[in-house]
Image (cartoon, rainbow, N blue to C red):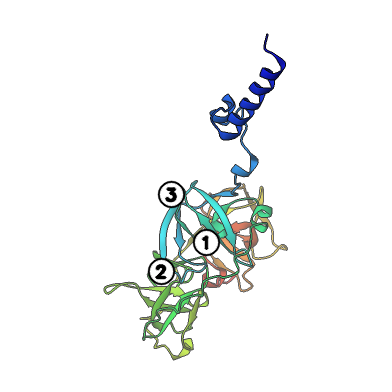
């Protein structure tokens, strides 16, 4: 056995060695072990949404006036970072890390999630548009058909998107259709009410070559079960037939009020139906007006 004085000596020596770092505990050099637990601060939640249209432009700022920086497609995941004050545009991160802006309408995400996104204070200013020196205008609706002539009964030959600028060449006699330049070699017509023009429309030259004749008939579809066909344009006329829901009908024209259509019947005859129960792609005012 060690004497009492030797025990005091050994304890003192060990204390000196520990303080000097010569002797250390085994746990000092062991890697930190967290038993598989990760601190919550290591996770960052990013709300996400998916593209709900076939093709979506990603832009450098919150407006169609900004340059396109990327394209995303239906079902693609977007990580939402910010919004502008009215929530019409979202600042998003793509899967490859690229950041840009997309129009909120084309992103599937819960509205309360979008509303809780932080509003970006320093929104980039909208660049001035590159407006041509000719008479011009820009599209005010999300999608606008370009037609081969001034009328809804004319064939669709192209499509314009909201914010697109167009060169205006002229108008029709009624000033409700505008002729535009599609390319160096082709022209088309768009409804004037969907174009914000750089000058009054009446100042444009009339470029319509004759007024196109309305077609002899149109195609429509019955939207209700059991639609009465009457002998004249009014509920006081006799019921001469009934049409089932979804039935395709030939529409020959309308009455003076625009509330009744004259349609062809399966037996070769004709009759009148309430216009509100027929789905047809032609506006009523574009249709021929018929005598009852």
Residue closer to the observer: 280 or 38: 38
Task: Left or right? Give the position of 127 relative to 18.
Answer: left
Measured as percent of width and height from the top left, residue 240 is found at: 64, 54
Estimate how packed mark 2 is, as few (under 14), some (14 to 19) or many (20 or more) residues with alpha carbons within 10 Å.
Answer: many
> Earlier along the polypeptide chain: callout 1 or callout 2?
2
Question: Mark 2 or mark 3: which is in front?
Answer: 3
Q: Secondary structure at mark 1?
A: loop
Q: Residue at x 46, y 48 (%)?
A: 95
The answer to whether residue 33 is visible is no
- Mark 1 sits on what residue? 281
Q: Vertical placement of 33 versus 88: above or below?
A: above
Residue denoted by label 3: 96
SS label for mark 2: strand
Sequence-wise, the earlier of marks 2 and 3 is 3
Q: CA distance from mark 2 to mark 3?
A: 39 Å
Tell me, yes or no, whether the two marked residues, 1 and 2, touch with CB atoms within 8 Å.
Answer: no
Q: CA distance from mark 1 to mark 3?
A: 42 Å
Helix, strand or loop under label 3: loop
Q: Nearer the viewer, residue 266 or 207?
A: 207
Q: Position of residue 274 (x, y in %)?
A: 65, 61
- Name the quarter where the C terminus is drawn: bottom right
- The tag earlier along the polypeptide, 1 or 3, is 3
Which of the labelled discs sits on residue 147, or is there none?
A: 2
Asked if residue 71 lies left or right of residue 258, the reply is: left
| Label 1 – label 2 distance at C-alpha | 14 Å
């Amino acid at each position: 056995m060690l004497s009492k004085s030797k025990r005091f000596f050994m304890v003192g020596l060990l204390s000196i060695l520990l303080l000097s770092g010569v002797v250390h505990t085994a746990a000092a050099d062991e890697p930190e072990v967290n038993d598989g637990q990760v601190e919550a601060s290591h996770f960052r939640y990013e709300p996400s949404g998916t593209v709900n249209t076939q093709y979506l432009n990603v832009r450098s700022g919150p407006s169609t006036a900004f340059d396109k920086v990327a394209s995303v497609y239906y079902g693609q995941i977007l990580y939402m970072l910010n919004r502008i004050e009215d929530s019409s545009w979202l600042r998003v991160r793509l899967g490859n890390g690229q950041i840009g802006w997309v129009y909120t309408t084309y992103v599937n995400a819960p509205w309360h999630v979008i509303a809780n996104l932080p509003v970006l204070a320093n929104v980039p200013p909208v660049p001035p548009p590159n407006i041509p020196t000719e008479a011009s205008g820009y599209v005010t609706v999300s999608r606008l058909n370009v037609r081969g002539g001034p009328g809804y009964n004319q064939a669709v030959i192209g499509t314009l998107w909201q914010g697109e600028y167009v060169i205006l060449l002229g108008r029709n006699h009624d000033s409700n259709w505008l002729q535009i330049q599609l390319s160096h070699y082709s022209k088309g017509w768009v409804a004037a009410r969907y174009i914000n023009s750089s000058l009054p429309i009446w100042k444009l030259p009339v470029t319509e070559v004759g007024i196109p004749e309305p077609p002899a008939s149109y195609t429509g579809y019955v939207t209700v079960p059991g639609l009465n066909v009457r002998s004249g344009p009014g509920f006081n006329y006799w019921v001469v037939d009934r049409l089932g829901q979804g039935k395709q009908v030939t529409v020959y024209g309308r009455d003076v009020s625009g509330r009744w259509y004259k349609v062809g019947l399966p037996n070769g005859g004709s009759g009148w139906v309430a216009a509100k129960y027929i789905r047809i792609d032609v506006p009523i005012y574009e249709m021929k007006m018929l005598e009852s």
